[in-house]
Image (cartoon, helix red, strand yellow):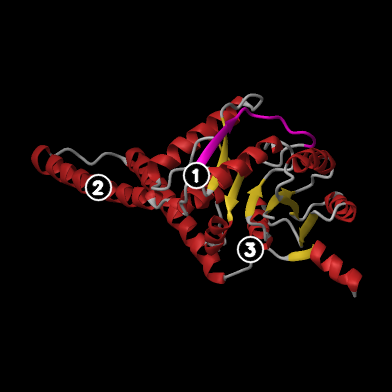
């Protein structure tokens, strides 16, 4: 019998975990023709998330867990789940039920019968989301799709079901600075998209502040486009040409009409403007260099502190 491994990243989700498990039990009961395993990944939670995972593992052997030594981020949790998943099919799903579990049987049937390698999901609406967050998200997708050769689908979620060959391809991209939405699109494979309306969290609060979303968007931009570097080069070239034109104009004015050079206020303004542009361009280059530096250090993407496999080995010993 084939097997589905469902990766569930968790960070301070002790309230949502029991609700999620209850809903997934209903789904697994419907999917009798395939084995389903829940792989919870504790991203260094500071509440009782790990304890709940251990209780679920004791209650149901289909529940497995990994626990990080600290908070490494959702991208690291997804990578750890993919690396430790052994199912013929692998799904990624949020624990807060904003990714509807009831879509999973349909996703499985599509992969089995329609020849797709991946069934991904996207939100058709953003009902219930703050307007400023919706506006910024829409703007991000429009911007990145203009500057990147890899198309990122607007409203795309991490929620998807993949065949093993696609999972193996994603694992080949073992980069430290990860942007999964871009990686999934970059590796290719035949994908079918399912739409659903936005769903409110079942419990708890979102961990994604505007600052974190902004930082995450920069990861996507720098990971899948060098357009900002090109922009910095173009700005530098334009200011170089402009400076030569200004020098020429000043020389002509002084030689022909005898006009004195403008005073210090204009000089100060120009100096500040040029200095600001130089700092902007230097900052863009610095961001790319910083990412390159982190990649060359070859640090692990995550560090495991505990897992259900170690727990079972300890009990046997």
Q: Is residue 130 left or right of residue 52?
A: left
Which residue is rendered at x = 8% and y = 40% of the image?
Answer: 256
114 or 50, nearer to the observer: 114
Q: Which residue is mark 1?
A: 191
**Label 3: which secondary element:** loop
Mark 3 Cα-neighbour bin, 10 Å: few <14, some 14–19, many ≥20: some
Percent x, y for residue 135?
54, 29
Q: Is residue 284 left or right of residue 217?
A: left
Q: Which residue is mark 2?
A: 243
Q: Which residue is mark 3?
A: 301
285 or 248, nearer to the observer: 285
Q: Are marks 2 and 1 in contact (CB under 8 Å)?
A: no
Percent x, y for residue 12?
79, 46
Which residue is rendered at x = 65% and y = 36% of the image?
Answer: 103
**Label 1: which secondary element:** strand
Q: Nearer the viewer, mark 2 or mark 1?
A: 1
Q: Quadrant of the N terminus?
A: bottom right
Mark 1 Cα-neighbour bin, 10 Å: few <14, some 14–19, many ≥20: some
Mark 3 or mark 2: whose residue is earlier in sequence = 2
Mark 2 or mark 1: whose residue is earlier in sequence = 1
The answer, for residue 158, to whether it is visible in the render is no
49 or 60, nearer to the observer: 60
What residue span does the magenta drawing correspond to? Answer: 191-204
């Amino acid at each position: 019998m084939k097997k589905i491994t469902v990766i569930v990243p968790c960070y301070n989700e002790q309230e949502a975990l029991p609700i999620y498990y209850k809903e997934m039990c209903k789904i697994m009961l419907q999917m009798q023709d395939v084995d389903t395993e829940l792989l919870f990944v504790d991203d260094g939670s500071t509440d009782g998330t790990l304890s709940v995972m251990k209780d679920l593992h004791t209650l149901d052997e289909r529940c497995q867990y990994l626990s990080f030594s600290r908070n490494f981020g959702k991208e690291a949790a997804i990578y750890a789940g993919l690396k430790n998943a052994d199912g013929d099919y692998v799904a990624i799903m949020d624990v807060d039920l904003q990714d509807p579990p009831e879509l999973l049987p349909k996703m499985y049937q599509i992969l089995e019968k329609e020849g797709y390698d991946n069934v991904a999901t996207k939100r058709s609406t953003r009902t219930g989301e703050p307007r400023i967050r919706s506006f910024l998200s829409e703007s991000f997708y429009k911007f990145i799709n203009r500057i990147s050769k890899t198309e990122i689908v607007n409203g795309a979620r991490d929620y998807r079901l993949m065949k093993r060959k696609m999972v193996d391809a994603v694992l080949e991209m073992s980069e430290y600075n990860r942007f999964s939405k871009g990686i999934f699109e970059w590796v290719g494979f035949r994908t079918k998209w399912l739409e659903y309306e936005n769903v409110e969290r079942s419990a708890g609060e979102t961990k994604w502040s505007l600052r974190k979303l902004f930082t995450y968007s920069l990861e996507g931009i720098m990971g899948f486009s060098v357009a900002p570097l090109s922009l910095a080069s173009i700005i530098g070239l334009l200011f170089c040409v402009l400076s030569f034109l200004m020098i020429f104009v000043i020389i002509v004015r002084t030689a022909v009409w005898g006009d004195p050079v403008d005073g210090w206020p204009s000089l100060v303004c120009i100096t500040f403007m040029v200095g600001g542009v130089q700092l902007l361009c230097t900052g863009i280059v610095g961001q790319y260099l910083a990412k390159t530096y982190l990649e060359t250090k070859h640090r692990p993407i995550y560090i495991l502190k505990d897992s259900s496999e170690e727990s079972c080995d300890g009990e046997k010993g």
